[in-house]
Amino acid sequence: MEIKKNYKINEILKIFDENNQGFVYDKNSITNDEFIKYVCVENQKPIGYLVLYPKSDFAIKDKYDIKIKIPNNSIYIWHLITKKGYERKGVAKTLINYLKTKYSNYNIYSIVDKNNYKSQELHKALGFVIVDTFKKAYKDTLDTYDLVKLSVNNLKNFNF
Ligand SMILES: CC(C)(COP(=O)(O)OP(=O)(O)OC[C@H]1O[C@@H](n2cnc3c(N)ncnc32)[C@H](O)[C@@H]1OP(=O)(O)O)[C@@H](O)C(=O)NCCC(=O)NCCS
């Protein structure tokens, strides 16, 4: 597996359609240049991807009702989806570990639906901790989300 930036965007759109499982929104972010797409590739084929919003104002942009202040040196995982049929093979782990290395002096945030068991388990296993909880209606139902942050102790410029 290797990670490529903004690779085969048409394939990424298909991965979104096939496997968002009702937990990932805003398909347009995939084709929007404000977002960076990191793609997990095996034999030239995308098998998962992550959409990164590389700025700290994500909570305002996506209208989260959160109580905490987000530090300036923060980035946010807008999408994370593994291709259907490729789950539980370490694809999401590879994508997040890539971010950990590439953005080692940033706070890395994500949100996880309380009902998204797989994603809750994934974030826990990779060292994310819950820093806030809020409700939001992405579609018609009001759901509860955890704002999670990667807990690492080697951050430069780290500020709470
Ligand atoms: C959530 C999702 C991204 C996980 O991707 P993945 O590539 O299957 O995850 P990985 O194989 O890297 O899993 C790494 C670890 O996460 C945990 N994990 C992942 N899926 C899990 C599951 N179904 N049950 C329990 N733990 C799970 C495990 O600890 C796993 O390590 P292990 O396999 O050695 O036990 C994938 O299921 C997906 O695309 N779901 C639909 C879209 C979505 O909900 N995205 C997240 C939005 S926040």
Image: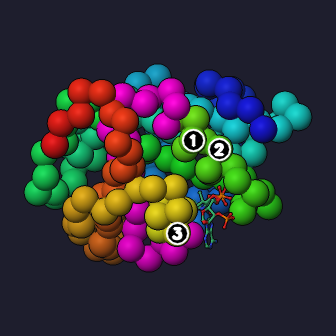
- Disc 3, ligand 1: is the CB inside 8 Å? yes
Quadrant in which the C terminus is drawn:
top left
Q: Quadrant of ligand 1?
A: bottom right
Disc 2 within 8 angstroms of ligand 1 (CB)? yes
Residue designated by label 1: 97
Q: Secondary structure at mark 3?
A: helix
| Classed neighbour count for the residue bearing mark 2: other residues with Cα under 10 Å, few (<14), some (14–19), many (≥20) | some
User: On the rendered structure, is 86 left or right of 34?
Assistant: right
Specify the amino acid type for callout 3.
Glu
Give residue 71's position: percent from left, percent from top: 19, 36
The three-letter code of the residue at mark 1 reads Asn
Residue shown at 11% from the left, 57% from the top: 67
Give the mark nearest the N terminus, 1 or 3.
1
CB atoms at circles 2 and 1 under 8 Å apart? yes
Residue identifier under label 2: 94
Mark 3 Cα within 10 Å, few/some/many (few <14, many 20+)?
A: few
**How is the structure coloured here?**
rainbow
Residue 112 location, quadrant: bottom left
- Pointer 3 residue: 121
* Left or right placement of residue 33 versus residue 43 in this view: left
- Horizontal side of 42 relative to 21 (left or right) equals right
CA distance separating discs 2 and 1: 5 Å
**Marks 1/3: CA–CA distance:** 16 Å
Q: Earlier in the sequence, mark 2 or mark 3?
A: 2
Label 1, secondary structure: give it.
helix
Say which residue appears at 36% left-offset and 28% top-offset. 105
84 lies above or below 10: below
Q: Is residue 103 magenta?
A: yes
Residue 44 at what x, y percent from top left? 84, 31
Magenta region: 100-118
- Rounded to the nearest angstrom, the CA distance separating label 2 from label 3 is 15 Å
